[in-house]
Image (cartoon, rainbow, N blue to C red):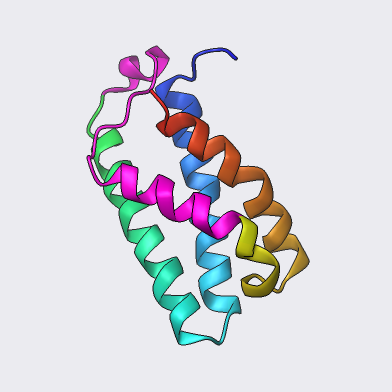
Amino acid sequence: MSQKTVSDALHIFYELNSALSDAYWETNDINSKDLFFAMKSMLQDELDELHKLSIQDHIYPYEPINPGVGQLSDKLRDLHPLMGSIVLRPKTYRNLDDLIPNACNLFEI
């Protein structure tokens, strides 16, 4: 597996943020909404830190900046096997199914 760059991480995180937003709006269960909102908030914290980097830094290997990103990784890993009962729209399910492993791979140092 090749080392992912900051640019790769940003791309995955933007896509994941969009998919989590879709899942949030598509569910009608308050507990699922809370889960998706919490994950989006943790992801946004990491994105906020990455936005502070200059464009020249986007070629460097990605390393998690925000310590809370470890919690996001755990929540994503917990969500992945349960998605069939939580994420009802097929497009959103496919997006999350593709993005969750990619995002979790980024968090492993």
Please check the rendered image and state whether residue 77 is part of the magenta-colored stretch, yes or no. yes
Q: Is residue 57 rendered to the left or right of residue 2? A: left
Q: Tag count in the figure?
A: 0
**Helix, strand or loop: magenta stretch:** helix
Of 35 and 13, nearer the camera is 35
Q: Is residue 84 rendered to the left or right of residue 29? A: right
Please give the name of the residue rendered at 51% of the width and 61% of the height, measured from the top-left corner. 20
Q: Quadrant of the N terminus?
A: top right
Q: Quadrant of the C terminus?
A: top left
Residue 38, placed above or below residue 55 = below
Region in magenta: 54-80
Please identify the residue farthest to the right as the structure is shown. 90
Residue 98 % position (x, y)? 67, 44
Residue 92 % position (x, y)? 67, 62
Residue 71, placed above or below residue 52 = below
Please give the name of the residue rendered at 33% of the width and 50% of the height, measured from the top-left corner. 71
Please give the name of the residue rendered at 41% of the width and 49% of the height, measured from the top-left corner. 74
Please give the name of the residue rendered at 45% of the width and 19% of the height, measured from the top-left corner. 5
Please check the rendered image and state whether residue 94 is part of the magenta-colored stretch, yes or no. no
Q: Quadrant of residue 64?
A: top left
Residue 10 % position (x, y)? 44, 35
Of 19 and 57, nearer the camera is 19
Residue 76 % position (x, y)? 49, 52
